[in-house]
Amino acid sequence: MPTALITGITGQDGSYLADFLLSKDYTVIGMVRRSSTVTFERIKHIQDEITIIQGDLHDQSSLVDVMEEYRPEEVYNLAAQSFVPTSWNQPVLTGEVTALGVTRLLEAIRHVNPKTRFYQASSSEMFGKVREVPQRETTPFYPRSPYGVAKVYAHWITVNYRESYDLFSVSGILFNHESPRRGLEFVTRKITNGVARIKLGLTKELHLGNLEAQRDWGFAGDYVEGMWLMLQQEQPRDYVLGTGQTHAVREFCEAAFGYVGLDYRDYVIQDPRFYRPAEVDLLVADPSKAKRELNWIPKFSFTELVQLMVDADLKLVAKDIS
């Protein structure tokens, strides 16, 4: 069985990727940072089927130790400080983990086993103030947050190690991908959890930022298959993954509230506290290269995604109050 190392395995993407790789009969190694607050909620259903180890993207020697002990054929780097608003409050930490952490991991691979295939989780936030619509692999980057800037560095250092050291290192430029496992701090989950709490009578309003920001939203479970497909190709190439459709935050609200028979306008309050210092107004993918070369097509529609998340939060909130 092939062995895969996943950094950030306790996150949304890490948990779905672990599910997927287990279905492919992989031995899955999940790397977590030593911390008293690590939560395994997203992977508790598979915790007996995977190996959890400690490692830190701040610490070069720990990454070398992991690579030497487990010798993975594939490494998926999903670990990052990934909440965009936090990156303004902690820009140096974001750079250390999201940018330089990738360099440390690539160095460990280069020195221990340069045949290891490496996937880097790049982000549509790199496009920021977009230069063209839709965005594809060749669209110039113009990041609008410390998080976006750090991801641009990580993306290009992945390309650089591929070209300089002949590593099989690729970047997946993923547009927004959501699920019931999304953190409550992200706007999609904030909306669906808010809908559930309002529907069940626990609160009467939901405070949000810019309702006109437009995103390309898909289901996270679809996207992890694309990550895997990138590492199965004969040649290492970077790919954009997205649905090719865009929806405003306002549309997400309308769909989520409407699904439970409510009008979002009666409950949503636009709050200046949640506006970004520099907004990213319009992100929409051109995933044609992934469709053509990887045969990757997202399965969930926007409406199905919203309803899946609302249903999950209704169950979760009902369980909490029962």
Image (cartoon, helix red, strand yellow):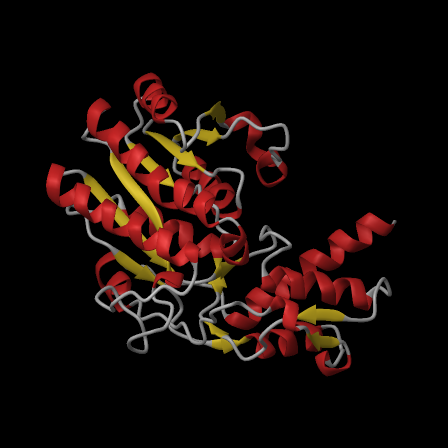
Image quarter of residue 194: bottom right
Q: Does residue 73 show up?
A: yes
Q: Which residue appears at 43% of the width and 54% of the height?
A: 147
Whole-percent x, y for residue 275 in the image:
58, 70
Q: Which residue appears at 60% of the width and 67% of the height?
A: 306
Nearest to the observer: residue 146 or residue 287 = 146
Please give left or right for residue 190 compared with residue 238 in the image.
Answer: right
Whole-percent x, y for residue 17 in the image:
44, 43
Nearest to the observer: residue 309 or residue 246 = 246
Please give left or right for residue 29 compared with residue 251 in the image.
Answer: left
Number of numbered callouts drawn: 0
Whole-percent x, y for residue 279 in the image:
48, 71
Image quarter of residue 4: top left
Q: Does residue 122 show up?
A: no
Whole-percent x, y for residue 28 in the image:
42, 30
Q: Quick check: 50 above or below 8? A: above
Q: Quick check: 78 above or below 137? A: above
Image quadrant in which the N terminus is located: top left
Q: Quick check: 242 above or below 212? A: above
Please give left or right for residue 99 compared with residue 187 in the image.
Answer: left
Nearest to the observer: residue 171 or residue 15 = 171
Image quarter of residue 108: top left
